[in-house]
Image (spheres, grey):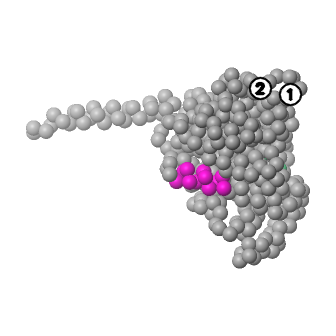
């Protein structure tokens, strides 16, 4: 009898708990789940290219550390075989568009990327690429242009975002422009530390970093780019992880595609191994952090690569290319971290960003129109 007075108190506490939970969701606060997402895109990297790199490597690759794998289908809105603009837009924004388009739908209307959504919700964001930052894949996360070749317009679009870190080539698209505008000064006045080499990237302690390391496209790793990709990845992770709300980071191994277009097996494998190092850094970060989802995929396959011979003891591998262009084959997806299981199976490339958004559990309340 003495304890009966506790009953109404318990009921009141339960009522408060139950009634608060849905309102938390409606107010747009994030439920506990994934804090950070690192999306790594190997441009043109099909399954044969991944296995060629695995076969050539003395040690197991980071690709082999993922507990979950899947396959995604890459056709674009107007072609069975996609380009990197349409595929990048599908991966970034969940919308099929025509080849050559960047961050716009088939009718030219802007579509917003998972990076833009993360930014809206106060997360830190970044893109790191071994191409110019204005090239199709990184541009798909930032810009809204009907033509991927409009590099200077794409550079201008960087200033319409609040992206915290961007690293790659393309300095001239900001500095030596047909319209004579100097976007380097605009970046500086908006708080970016603008640096032009790897030393500058590693030495910068700024919360906002523009690493524009080459006038146009960087060279292959073997031709002088060196450790730019893994080093930039490490630096980007250090800077972005200071944001307590979390971050979204896209990292691209851009030149896997270029080596495959050129049908040069050694360079293709080397660029894939370089990309795998960035994958390893992302996984190391996620293993420590425990609230980070890591996804590795490609935008499409390039080269129609097949493996016609090899030896796992000598790590020799013989590749054969069936085209100098892209192909329609499905591309691999590897996932690690909370929510990784959602990335298994066979699905369309437009599903990827939807899966990322559902992992972040953003509400739609701040959706851009
Ligand atoms: Mg690319
Ligand atoms: Zn290509």
The residue under the point 10% across, 38% down is 2
Query: Taking 330 as reference, is 362 above or below it?
Result: above
Number of marks in picture: 2
Confirm whether residue 34 shows in the render: yes
Between 268 and 107, the residue placed more toward the observer is 268
Expressed as whole percent of the image width and height from the top left, the position of residue 292 reads 54, 47
The quarter of the rendered structure image containing the C terminus is: top right
Query: Taking 265 as reference, is 164 above or below it?
Result: above
Query: Taking 367 as reference, is 62 above or below it?
Result: below
Between 141 and 60, the residue placed more toward the observer is 60
Between 139 and 267, the residue placed more toward the observer is 267
Q: Secondary structure at mark 1?
A: loop
| Mark sitting earlier along the chain (2/1) | 1
Confirm whether residue 93 shows in the render: no
Direction from residue 291 to residue 368 in the image, left or right: right
Direction from residue 221 to residue 26 in the image, left or right: left
Per the image, the residue denoted by label 1 is 177
Expressed as whole percent of the image width and height from the top left, the position of residue 263 reads 87, 60
Start and end of the magenta stretch?
Answer: 277-287
The yes-or-no answer for disc 1 within 8 Å of ligand 1 is no
* Mark 1 Cα-neighbour bin, 10 Å: few <14, some 14–19, many ≥20: some
The residue under the point 89% across, 26% down is 178
Per the image, the residue denoted by label 2 is 183
Specify the farthest residue to the left. Answer: 2
The residue under the point 65% across, 60% down is 63
Expressed as whole percent of the image width and height from the top left, the position of residue 114 reads 65, 38
């Amino acid at each position: 009898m003495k304890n009966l007075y506790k009953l109404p108190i318990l009921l009141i506490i339960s009522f408060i708990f139950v009634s608060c939970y849905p309102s938390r969701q409606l107010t747009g606060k994030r439920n506990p789940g994934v804090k950070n997402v690192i999306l790594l895109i190997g441009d043109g990297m099909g399954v044969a290219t991944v296995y060629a790199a695995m076969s050539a490597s003395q040690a197991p690759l980071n690709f082999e550390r993922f507990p979950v794998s899947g396959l995604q289908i890459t056709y674009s809105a107007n072609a069975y075989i996609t380009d990197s603009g349409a595929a990048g837009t599908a991966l970034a924004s969940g919308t099929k568009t025509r080849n050559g388009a960047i961050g716009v739908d088939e009718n030219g209307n802007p579509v917003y990327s998972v990076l833009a959504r993360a930014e809206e919700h106060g997360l830190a964001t970044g893109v790191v690429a071994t191409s110019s930052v204005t090239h199709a894949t990184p541009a798909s996360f930032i810009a809204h242009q009907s033509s991927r070749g409009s590099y200077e317009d794409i550079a201008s679009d960087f200033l319409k975002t609040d992206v915290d870190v961007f690293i790659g080539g393309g300095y001239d698209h900001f500095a030596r422009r047909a319209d004579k505008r100097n976007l380097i000064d605009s970046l500086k006045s908006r708080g970016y530390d603008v640096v032009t080499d790897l030393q500058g990237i590693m030495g910068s302690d700024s919360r906002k970093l523009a690493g524009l390391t080459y006038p146009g496209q960087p060279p292959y790793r073997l031709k002088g780019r060196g450790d730019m990709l893994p080093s930039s990845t490490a630096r980007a992770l250090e800077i972005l992880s200071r944001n307590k709300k979390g971050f979204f980071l896209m990292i691209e191994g851009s030149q896997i595609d270029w080596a495959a277009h050129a049908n040069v097996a050694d360079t293709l494998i080397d660029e894939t191994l370089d990309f795998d190092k960035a994958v390893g850094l992302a996984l190391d970060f996620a293993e420590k952090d425990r609230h980070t989802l890591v996804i590795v995929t490609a935008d499409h396959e390039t080269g129609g690569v097949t493996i016609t011979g090899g030896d796992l003891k000598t790590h020799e591998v013989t590749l054969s290319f069936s085209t100098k262009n892209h192909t329609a084959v499905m591309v691999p997806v590897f996932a690690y971290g909370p929510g990784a299981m959602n990335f298994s199976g066979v699905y369309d490339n437009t599903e990827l960003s939807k899966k990322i958004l559902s992992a972040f559990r953003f509400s739609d309340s701040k959706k851009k129109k």
